[in-house]
Amino acid sequence: MNALAARRRHPAAIALLLLLGLLVTGFAYAAVAPQSASAEATTAEQVEKGKQLFRANCASCHGVNAEGRKTGIGDQIAGPALAGVGAAAVDFQMGTGRMPMRAPSQQAPRATVEFNQEQIDAIGAYIASLAPGPGVPSAEDVDPAKGDPAAGGELFRVNCAMCHNFAGSGGALTRGKYAPSLMNVEPKHIYEAMETGPQSMPVFNDNNLDPESKRDIIAFLKSVENTPSQGGHQLGALGPVTEGWFAWVFGLGVLIAAAVWLGQKSA
Amino acid sequence: MSTETYPSGRPADRLRDGDRPVAHAPSAAARKAGGVAGWIDDRTSAAKGVNYLLRKVFPDHWSFMLGEIAMYSMIVCLLSGALLTLWFVPSAGHTVYDGSYVPLRGQGMSEAYASTLNISFDIKGGLIIRQIHHWAALMFIIGLTVHMFRVFFTGAFRKPRELNWVIGSVLALLAIIEGFAGYSLPDDLLSGTGIRAMEGFVQTAPVIGSYLAYAIFGGPFPGEMIIPRLYSAHVLLIPAILVGLFTAHIVIVALQKHTQFPGPGRTNDNVVGYRVMPVYAAKAGGFFFIVFGVIALIAGLFTINPIWAYGPYDPSPVTAGSQPDWYMGFADGALRLLPGWLEFEFFGFTLSLNIALGALVLLPLVYTVLGAYPFFERWVTGDNREHHLLERPRNNPTRTGIGMAGITAYSVFFFAAGNDIMAIKLGLSINDITWIFRIGLFVFPVLAFWVTKRICLSLQRRDRETVLHGFESGRIIRGADGSFHERHDPLNKYDQWILVQHEPATPMQLTAEADENGVASPAARKDRLRAKVSQWWYKDAVNPVTPAELAAAHHDGHEAEALEAPLDYEGIEGRQDHAGGEGGEGADTDVKRDDESDRDSDVDSGIGSASRLRE
C-alpha cells in the first residue's frame, strides 16, 4: 500500500480532489473553448503604462477612466465608453491610425499610425483590464496561407460585399459614412474588425463567423490583392460606373480625335 | 448600256451595243477585274446600282462620322459575339467549377457562368474577345447617342428625315435592351442582381405584374428559363431587328442624300463633297479599322466586367457598386431618386409607383419623347419645307436650349445612378447627393435651357456684328485729330456667307379670330395654343443680317470702319448656280472662282470638287 492510497481517507482528500477536478475542468475548458485568442499575457506593469498613455492621449474624448464623454451638445458623444471593447478593438483602431481621431467627422478615416506596437499593446492591456473583451488574434489565426480563398470568397460575397464591394474596394453608406477599401490592410486588422465591428460595421463574432471562416475571408482578400489583374487595368474595381466613364471619356475622345483628323484629310 | 431593240447576232453582242469604243487598252489588272465585274453584271445587272452607290457624293465633316462609330462598333459586336457563341453555354444548369481560375475552383455555379469563366481563362484569346465585345457594346451605344446629338442639334431630323429619326430612336431603344440582355447572360453576381432588379420592375406593373414576372421567368425567380430566353433574345431576335432597322436607316440616308452644313455653293438641292469611290471608301474603310483598333486596344489594356471577381450568382448576396452598364444608368438613377412614399396600397393591392415610374414608365417615355420631337417642332414652326442644309446650333436657340435641357435631365438621372461612387470618391454624403439631384432634376434643365439659349443668342449677335463691321484686325490707327481706333477688316465672302445664310425667324401668326361677320373661327381657337408656343419659340430671335442692313452698315459706318470691298454675299450662291447648273446627278463640276485671292483654305477644301445632285 503506497502513501497515496494510505491517505485516501484523509479529511483533506475530498477537498483536494475537488480542487483537482476543478483545475482539470478549468484547464480543459480553456484549451477547448472557442477562444477570443489572447496572444500574450499582460502584466501589471504593462497595464499601468497603458493607463498613463491612455490618460495622456485618449482621455480627452473617452474620459479619464474610459467611461466615455459627451460633448455637451445634445446627445453627441465625444468618445464612447471603452470597458469591454477588448484589446482587439484598441489594436484595430490605433493600429490603423483611426485613433486618436484627427478631427470630429462622420467616421474616423485610416491614417498614419502614431504609436508603436508596444504602446498600442499597453493601452490594449489597460482597456482589457477594465472588463473582459476580445483579445488580439494570434498570428496563426490570421495567416492567409492557412485559409481557403474560394470558401472565403463565398463568405465575403454573402457577408461583406454589400458594403465593401465585390473586390473589397469599398462602398458608400448613409450620410457620408462609408465602408473603406480592404486592400492593403493587415490580416490581423481584418480579423479584429470582424470581431469588434468598428464604427458602422456589424460585429461578426465567433458564433456568426468562426475563426476559420474569418481566416478564409482574409485569405480571399489577400488573394484579390495579390492576384495579377487578368483583364488589364481594373479602373478602380468599382464596377460599371468607372467603365462607363472610361468609355465616354477615353474611348469616345480618341474616336472623335480620329474623326476630326480624318475629316481634315482632303482628297 | 442596253437598248430598247435587240440587234441580231450573238446574245452577248447586244450587251455591248452602245458601248463606246475603248480608246486605250486597259491594263492587265483592269481587264481581269472588268472580266469578273462583267461576268457578275451579265447575271445581276448590278453595275448600275453599284455605280450609283460608288459615285454617290457625301459631304465632309467630322461630326458625320459619329454615326459611323456606332455602325462600326455594332459590326465589332456582331463579329466578337459570333465568336463568343462558340463557347458560351446558355444554361442555368448547375455545375461545379473545375477550370484554371483557382479562387473559384470547387464552387457550385451555373453552366452559363462556368462557360464564361472558361472563355475568360481557358479559351485562348477568349478574354480579349469578351472584353472587345463588351467595350464595343459600350462604344456602340455611346456612338449612337452622340450621333443623335449631332442630328438633333443641327436640325437634320426635319422634313424629309423625320421617319429616319424615328427609326433611329427605335434603334437606340433596341440597342440598350440588347445590351441589357447581354449583360445579364454570364450569370455572375452583378448580372444576376440586374435580372433580380428586372424581375422587381416587372412585378411593379399594376395588376399583371406578378403574372408577367412568372411568365418571363417561367416560374418563380430565378428559375432555369431566364438565361436561355435572354440568350435567344440577345443573339437572335434583337440583333435581327437591329440589323434590319439599321439597314433601313442607311438605305434611307442613301435615298434622301446626306445633309450638309451650310457653306458657299451648298444649297438645299445639292450635295457638295466627295464621291464614295475612292474618297469615302478609303476614309470610311479606314475609320472602321481605327474604331476596331481603338476598341481592341482598350479591350487589351482595361478590364471590363471582371465576372470572375463578382463570383457566381446567388440570390442572397449583393455587392456595393451594383450598377448597370452606363446606358441603363438613367433608369437606375431614377430609381435612386424616387422617394419611397410613392408606394400606395388599395384594397390589399400594392401600387409601387416608387419603382414603376423609374423602371416601367421612364424608359419608354424617354424614347417616345425623342421619337416624337420632330413632329412637335414641325407643329410649332409650321415649317413644311424640305431641309437638306443643316442649321448651325446657334441659329436655332430654342431647339438647342431644349436639347441641352433634355441632356441635362438625362444626365441628372444618369449621375444619380453613380451616387454611391461619387459619395466615396468625393467624400460626400450620399443623402446630400441624392437631394441635390432630386431638386436638380427640376432646376438644372431649366437653367440649362436658359443658359444655352442666351449663349446661342450672344453668338448670333456676334455673328451679326462680325458681318456688319468686319473682324477686329488688332491694328490701331491714329486719326488726324489724334484719336485712336482699331481697324476692322472685312470678312471674305465665303466666311461671310456662312454667317448670313440662315433663315430669319418667322413665328406663326394667329389667323383672324373672327371673320368679317364676327363669327368666331373654330380653327383660330385651335391654333391659339400653337401660335402662342410659336411666339415663345421665336421670342428674342436674332435674325441674320439682310443685304440692306449690310449696305447701310457700309455707307453709314465710320470712315475707318468702312469695309474696303463692296460685299454681295448673295452673289456667291448665284455664282454656284452657274457653275453647277449643267451637271447632272453625280457629275463633277469644278467650281471656278474669279477672286482667287480671297480664297480661304478652309473653304477651299470643301468646294474643290463640288457636285450637284438634283433632288
Image (spheres, coloured by chain):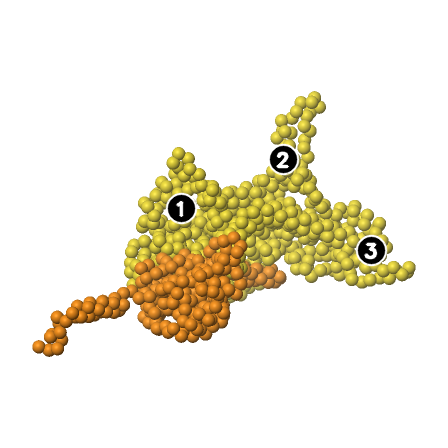
Chain colours: A orange, B yellow
Q: Position of residue A61 (x, y in %)?
A: 49, 63
Q: Identify the amino acid type marked 2.
A: Arg
Q: Residue at x 52, y 53 (%)?
A: A74
What residue would you read off at disc 2? B530
Q: Position of residue B31 (x, y in %)?
A: 50, 62
- Numbered disc 2: what chain? B
Q: In the picture shown, does residue A16 fall above or below B372?
A: below
Crowdedness near tag 3: few (<14), some (14–19) or many (≥20) residues, C-alpha within 10 Å: many
Residue farthest bottom in this picture: A2
Q: Nearer the viewer, mark 1 or mark 2?
A: 1
Rounded to the nearest angstrom, the CA distance separating label 3 from label 2 is 44 Å
What residue would you read off at disc 1? B200
Crowdedness near tag 2: few (<14), some (14–19) or many (≥20) residues, C-alpha within 10 Å: some
Q: Nearer the viewer, mark 3 or mark 1?
A: 1
Q: Residue at x 49, y 53 (%)?
A: A75
In depth, the one of A89 and A246 nearer the eye is A89
What residue would you read off at disc 3? B561
Q: Position of residue B254 (x, y in %)?
A: 55, 50
Q: Which numbered disc flags the more N-terminal residue, 3 or 2? A: 2
